[in-house]
Image (spheres, rainbow, N blue to C red):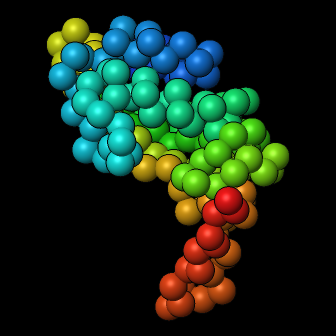
Amino acid sequence: MSKEANIAAQKKMGEIINSYQFDKLNEVMAPNVKDHDPADDQGPGPEGFAHWFTQFHSAFPDFKIAVEHLVADEDNVAFAYTITGTQGGPFNGIPASGKKIKVRGMQISKFNSDAKIVERWGASHEVGILQQIGGMKPVAHLDEPPVISAPAL
């Protein structure tokens, strides 16, 4: 497929995620899509992505992803994004805080000839999320390790 078709598929993925219709991710991902940076309990394929986004949505029910910059070639789409939301449920053992988050991330998607994602690399600033919801104290100096707060029971 063309660069334009890959960009359209990537944009469709964003629409699926921002409308919380995670069961439709198979429309833009190959069945054997490989995530090179999966979450701990993500699982394989489009279903693994759907599982992760469902969990994230339960923690941040109003989250949105906004693409800030996008570049593409014939096989890949790379983009920088911002995630915003309000913590309304537990996240990584941290109970709902009602606090707002705003973090950056980057992703690279590799596409096949059908304009479906076959590989993904990327990361969001999870430490920033934890700091903003009170699960981790900010680090004063880069040479000091972060202090992890124990989750409230």
Q: Would residue 49 appear left or right of 16 to someone viewing this image? A: left
Residue positioned 36% across, 42% down in the render: 41
Query: Can residue 93 be seen by looking at this rendering?
Result: yes
Please name whichever residue, 2 or 116, is drawn nearer the observer in this view of the structure.
116
Q: Where is residue 111 in the image (x, y as percent from the top left)?
A: 24, 23
Q: Would residue 124 appear left or right of 48 to someone viewing this image? A: right
Q: Would residue 18 appear left or right of 124 to someone viewing this image? A: right
Residue positioned 27% across, 38% down in the render: 35
Q: Where is residue 101 in the image (x, y as percent from the top left)?
A: 72, 49
Quadrant that contains the N terminus: top left
Q: Where is residue 39 in the image (x, y as percent from the top left)?
A: 38, 45
Quarter residue 150 falls in? bottom right
Residue positioned 34% across, 28% down in the render: 48
In the image, is residue 136 above or below residue 119? below
Please name whichever residue, 135 or 22, is drawn nearer the observer in this view of the structure.
135
**Residue located farthest toward the right when viewing the structure as drawn:** 98
Quadrant that contains the C terminus: bottom right
Quarter residue 28 falls in? top left
Residue positioned 35% across, 37% down in the render: 42
**Count of numbered circles in the view:** 0
